[in-house]
Image (cartoon, rainbow, N blue to C red):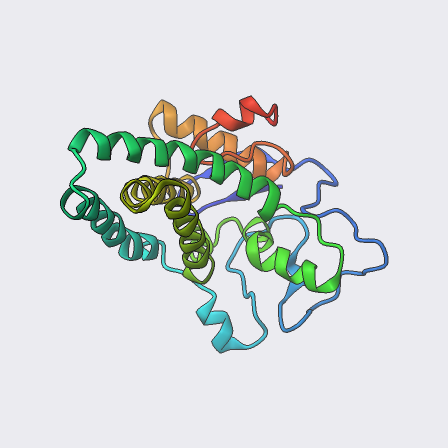
Amino acid sequence: MVIKTSSQPYGITTQSGVRLIPPIEGIDLPDTLFGVRVMDWALPKEGEAHLMVNPWLDRLSRVHPATPLVLYVPMVLSLIWRGLILHGLSVSHVLAWMLAGIFFWTFAEYSLHRGFFHFTPRSKLSLVLAYLIHGVHHAYPDDDRKLVMPPVFSLPVGFLFYGLFIVLMGRAYGDVFHAGFLLGYLCYDMTHYLVHAVPMRNHWGIAIKKNHMLHHFQMPNRRYGVSNTFWDYIFQTR
């Protein structure tokens, strides 16, 4: 089976028998659990995901791809302003700490994708959570309203990291480090959207798209990096 977008085929065929989740002992996959259509979680398919049984909740589960930019670009600019004006940091210090934040994001991207998005559910409730968090995207990789993180997830996680940075680094450096962290997240989310929705023309784009499509259709337990493959090399998950 070859999954296609409206613009071009992904060009990677699913291996026979590859499933997105392992069998869970004692739990059959029903049509719905807690109002979530988990029966869609099998091999990837074309079309839009109708995640929730309730049509109003289903609409709320859909996220426009520009949402992260609208939410987080002002935050990044505000944090840079705080570093330069409020805390009096030099431009070189701000840039250095932002670069460190971007690099830390790449590790967070890999770790969240591998350890959290692909956790093995052990109960009906954790099965629903796994499907809501990431499984629905693997079930419907073409759905352009499931390609960026919903704010209901990204905002709490972002504030959790922000608090951690402030505790560890202090207010001034924590602010600009978090600005870089958020910028790295935006690069990840926009890269993920482009990889799925837009034909790639340059060498980097083609390579990163192929890497991610291999994760989707042949190696769901490998190739966790989306915006980069650095940590896959480090942890030997290529």
| Pick the front one: 6 or 108 | 108
Rendered position, 54 above or below 63:
below
Q: Is residue 113 left or right of residue 184?
A: right
| Pick the front one: 100 or 56 | 100
Snapshot quadrant of residue 102: top left
Rendered position, 89 above or below 36:
above
Looking at the image, the residue that sits furthest to the right is 26
Q: Quadrant of the N terminus?
A: top right
Tell me if residue 197 can be seen: no
Q: Residue 155: horizontal and vertical position, in percent?
A: 41, 58
Rendered position, 92 above or below 58:
above
Snapshot quadrant of residue 200: top left
Q: Residue 126: horizontal and vertical position, in percent?
A: 68, 59
Q: Residue at left 51%, top 30%?
A: 211
Q: Residue at left 47%, top 36%?
A: 226
Q: Residue 11: horizontal and vertical position, in percent?
A: 52, 33
Q: Is residue 131 left or right of residue 85?
A: right
Q: Quadrant of the C terminus?
A: top right
Looking at the image, the residue that sits furthest to the left is 85
Q: Is residue 80 left or right of residue 233?
A: left
Snapshot quadrant of residue 216: top right
Q: Residue at left 61%, top 27%?
A: 237
Tell me if residue 46 can be seen: yes
Q: Residue 158: horizontal and vertical position, in percent?
A: 41, 52
Disc tally is: 0
| Pick the front one: 139 or 231 | 231
| Pick the front one: 163 or 19 | 163
